[in-house]
Image (tube, rainbow, N blue to C red):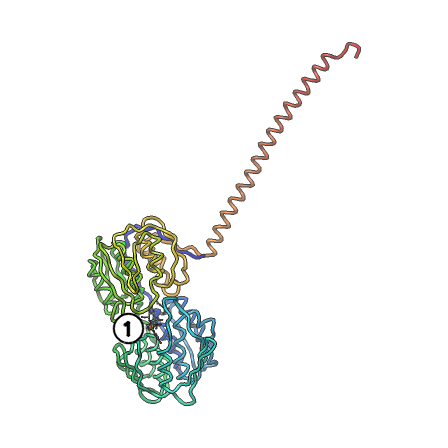
């Protein structure tokens, strides 16, 4: 089992660079399917497990992909299949984002219901409602969705019941090639939506209003490949800001954009953390004790649900009691049980967690129940007394580029043990034990031999004595 081992108590300092945003690059790579001409060149791609998964989905549909360092080149001139493979779609929620581009580009798609982190039920009704409004016929059965349209999709007025990030992105991509204008109301406003709109517009689309609740998309006949730089990952940046604050450290998070992190920055400042924004990053300085604050997750520009568990880790070591309320997903408190193994005192009441601050955290064996839970446990471990072993690392690998390397560069005592490495270590220990056992047997044998020799020696001297005696008592006639 792969694990990350952290010895807590080190104050972090130095500079850490943020990678490209996972939640921006995934829809952008899906949108590359819309380019009939020219290659799409995507720069600052974070090389994460999720990126590898979507790359495989695109390849299975007929796109050609190559990459060098963090630059990916996609050629989607030919789409060879309308069927997205089940094994890939079930692995990751964002792979469902190929539905909009496929419908718009070839008018047909067969895709399984998506998987992803177990943080709630995560329906896709708003995506489907949007496609249906644009003229797609949709059937559902046996865990699969089939959608088709005999003509080009038609622009429509679509009101989202919830400001869903994924539905906004999927509908925006489909509408980019639809006939006529689409008005998307109650759209999500996340920075990743704006990045996708910028990418689509560079490809030749006409998307206006991204970042507000009303997006207007005027459909165009075709789109072409372009070069695009992905925005920095605000959740990764926020995680390093928490890591700095929880250790009472002083860290410059290079590349972090203040405007994308307003709710996180303002909560940190309320707690007494010094946050200094500049053109090329954000510096975080903290001196304990920190004050407790209440946090409620909301769609952007509210406090991001993807930062809730990391924030909870920080609240565990602040003075007083805090209330953390999760309104975006109905089951995103699974990290609480793991924190409790580290001596955290947290009580869940409905959609809120009552967090007792100022608890001396202790190292423990814990498991990442989802991506951000894993990051939060690592943050708590940086502050805990003793050693913490975090398993469930495949979740963390979905969203953090080299988290151990980046934290170690800030002075954290952290390392990763790969499953094979662990097996190898176990085999080495077994070899050593076996060698010791063999040596012990040899020693026992040697000792036994010595004893036997001694016994033999005393037996022969006894025999010699006896013989001597016998000789002595021999009759004179012999
Ligand atoms: C790859 C990606 O970008 N993932 C992010 C995206 O996920 P994702 O796009 O899946 O999240 P959504 O914004 O769609 O989900 C928000 C809420 O809307 C509900 N909902 C969503 C769609 C739908 O058709 N019907 C419906 O009821 C969901 O169950 C959830 O309660 O936004 C989430 C909310 O900021 C983040 O936590 C994820 O990190
Ligand atoms: C929940 C997340 O991702 P996904 O939507 O891909 O499951 C996340 O990034 O925290």
Q: Residues within 10 Å of mark 1 (few under 14, many from 20)?
A: many
Report the front residue among 8 and 432.
8
Give x and y (percent) for residue 285.
22, 57
From this viewpoint, which residue is outermost toward the top?
476
**At x 71% / y 12%, what residue is drawn?**
472
Which quadrant of the render holds ligand 1? Answer: bottom left
Residue carrying label 1: 191
- Is residue 281 visible to us here? no
From this viewpoint, which residue is outermost toward the front?
349
Q: Is residue 303 left or right of residue 94?
A: left
Give x and y (percent) for residue 320.
22, 55
Q: Is residue 151 left or right of residue 15?
A: right
Q: Is residue 457 left or right of residue 477?
A: left
Q: Quadrant of residue 63?
A: bottom left
In what quadrant of the picture does the C terminus appear? Answer: top right
Looking at the image, residue 30 lies above or below residue 239: below
Local secondary structure at mark 1: helix
In what quadrant of the picture does the N terminus appear? Answer: bottom left
Looking at the image, residue 149 lies above or below residue 298: below
Q: Quadrant of residue 254?
A: bottom left
From this viewpoint, which residue is outermost toward the right?
477
């Amino acid at each position: 089992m792969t694990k990350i081992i952290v010895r807590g108590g080190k104050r972090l300092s130095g500079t850490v660079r943020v990678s490209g945003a996972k939640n921006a690059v995934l829809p952008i790579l899906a949108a590359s399917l819309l380019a009939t001409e020219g290659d799409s060149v995507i720069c600052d791609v974070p090389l994460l497990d999720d990126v590898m998964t979507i790359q495989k989905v695109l390849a299975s549909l007929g796109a050609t992909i190559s990459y060098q360092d963090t630059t990916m080149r996609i050629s989607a001139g030919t789409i060879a299949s309308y069927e997205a493979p089940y094994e890939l779609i079930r692995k990751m929620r964002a792979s469902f984002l190929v539905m909009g581009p496929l419908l718009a580009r070839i008018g047909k798609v067969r895709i399984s219901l998506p998987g992803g982190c177990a943080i709630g039920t995560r329906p896709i009704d708003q995506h489907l409602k949007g496609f249906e409004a644009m003229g797609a016929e949709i059937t559902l059965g046996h865990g699969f969705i089939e959608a088709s349209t005999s003509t080009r999709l038609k622009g429509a007025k679509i009101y989202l019941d919830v400001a869903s990030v994924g539905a906004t992105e999927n509908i925006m991509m489909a509408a980019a090639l639809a006939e006529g204008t689409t008005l998307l109301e109650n759209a999500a406003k996340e920075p990743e939506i704006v990045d996708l709109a910028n990418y689509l517009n560079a490809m030749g689309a006409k998307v206006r209003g991204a970042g507000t609740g009303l997006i207007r998309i005027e459909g165009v006949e075709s789109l072409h490949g372009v070069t695009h730089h992905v925005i920095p990952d605000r959740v990764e940046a926020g995680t390093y800001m928490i890591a700095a604050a929880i250790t009472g450290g002083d860290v410059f998070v290079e590349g972090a954009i203040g405007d994308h992190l307003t709710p996180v920055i303002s909560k940190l400042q309320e707690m007494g953390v010094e946050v200094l924004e500049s053109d090329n990053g954000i510096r975080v300085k903290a001196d304990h004790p920190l004050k407790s604050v209440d946090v409620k997750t909301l769609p952007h520009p509210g406090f991001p649900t993807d930062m809730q568990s990391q924030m909870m880790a920080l609240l565990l070591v602040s003075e007083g009691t805090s209330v953390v309320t999760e309104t975006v997903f109905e089951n995103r408190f699974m990290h609480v049980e793991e924190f409790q193994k580290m001596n955290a005192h947290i009580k869940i009441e409905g959609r809120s967690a009552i967090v007792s601050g100022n608890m001396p955290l202790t190292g423990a064996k814990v498991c990442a129940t989802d991506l951000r839970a894993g990051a939060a446990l690592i943050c708590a471990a940086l502050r805990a007394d003793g050693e913490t072993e975090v398993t469930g690392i495949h979740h963390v690998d979905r969203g953090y580029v080299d988290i151990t390397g980046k934290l170690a560069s800030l002075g954290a005592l952290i390392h990763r043990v790969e499953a094979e490495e662990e097996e190898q270590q176990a085999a080495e220990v077994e070899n050593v034990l076996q060698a010791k056992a063999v040596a012990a047997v040899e020693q026992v044998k040697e000792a036994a031999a010595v004893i036997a020799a001694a016994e033999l020696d005393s037996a022969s001297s006894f025999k010699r004595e006896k013989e001597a005696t016998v000789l002595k008592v021999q009759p004179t006639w012999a």
